[in-house]
Image (tube, rainbow, N blue to C red):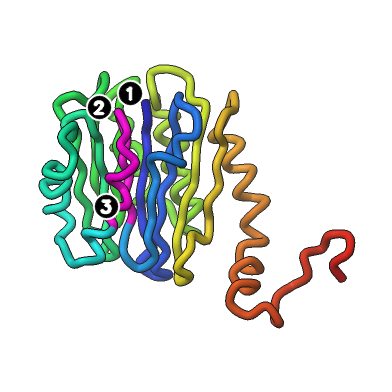
Amino acid sequence: MTFSVAGLCPDTGMMGCAISSSSIAVASRCAFVHSGVGVALSQNVTNPVLGPLALELLQEGVAVEQIPGVLAKADPHFQWRQLGVLDRQGNGVTFSGDRALGLHATARGRHCLAMGNLLANTRVPQAMVAAFEQSRGHLAERLLLALEAGLEAGGELGPVHSAGLLMSAEPSWPVVDLRVDWHIAPLHELRLLWRQYQPQMQAYITRAQDPAQADAFGVPGDE
């Protein structure tokens, strides 16, 4: 019930993912990042434990290609899952279990990976990878372009209702965590949210790191 893309920018060190689904609140269950470590996507019949566990394994030095095998031992229902993990060097691994729903597929590219289940066709992940590889600019923009390319290529077989964009940079907390949890056009709404947030992103980082140098909030009472 989901299609997603993960990617990194080797120039800035930013890592992140974009995801969409017919289910509500997909990003809260399926998308995970850890600054300086990697990105994990755990979807299909979802077990939200797997994403953080995959990132813990990466941080401990487990090679990315070994992670599905380790997680298979930790989850007795692993054949229901679909998993994608990208490390900080851009190495990726994907897995689709025997019980993955409907048409499902994965694709890997330079500094990115993509996957989906209950797809309109199996070309959707490759369309996302191609869009990411061919794009330039801010990582968030590249991830959104890739997700939109997946929708244009067919996306999920049914209508999508939720979407999310999650990214990390130098701070230990996600610098972008935008979600649309029930909407008739969630990808369009997610792009509008990014346009609103992008000019403010650095100010929020500065407020955490050096409040004395931060801009005012620009709301009544804060001068």
State if disc 1 and disc 2 touch (CB < 8 Å). yes
Instruction: Give neighbour class at mark 3: few <14, some 14-19, many 20+ (Cα, 10 Å).
Output: some
Q: Does 102 appear above or below 207?
A: above
Q: Where is residue 33 in the image (x, y as percent from the top left)?
A: 38, 56
Please tell me whether mark 3 sits on a helix, a strand or a loop: helix
The three-letter amino acid code for the residue at tag 3 is: Leu
The three-letter amino acid code for the residue at tag 2 is: His
| Residue 135 inside the magenta-drawn segment | no
| Residue range corresponding to the magenta coloring | 39-55
List the residue tagged with mark 3: 53
In the displayed structure image, the side of residue 117 where residue 195 appears, left or right: right
Instruction: Give neighbour class at mark 2: few <14, some 14-19, many 20+ (Cα, 10 Å).
Output: many
Q: Which of marks 2 and 3 is nearer the N terminus?
A: 3
Q: Which quarter shows the N terminus?
A: top left
**Disc 3 and disc 1: Cα gap in Å?**
26 Å
The three-letter amino acid code for the residue at tag 1 is: Leu
Q: Position of residue 78 (x, y in %)?
A: 18, 35
List the residue tagged with mark 2: 104
In the displayed structure image, the side of residue 48 where residue 97 appears, left or right: left
List the residue tagged with mark 1: 119
Q: Nearer the viewer, residue 10 or 41?
A: 41
Q: Position of residue 69 (x, y in %)?
A: 11, 46
**Disc 2 and disc 3: Cα gap in Å?**
23 Å
- The residue drawn where x is 48% and y is 63% is 173
Please tell me whether mark 1 sits on a helix, a strand or a loop: loop
In the displayed structure image, the side of residue 220 where residue 169 appears, left or right: left
Q: Position of residue 152 (x, y in %)?
A: 44, 29
Instruction: Give neighbour class at mark 1: few <14, some 14-19, many 20+ (Cα, 10 Å).
Output: many
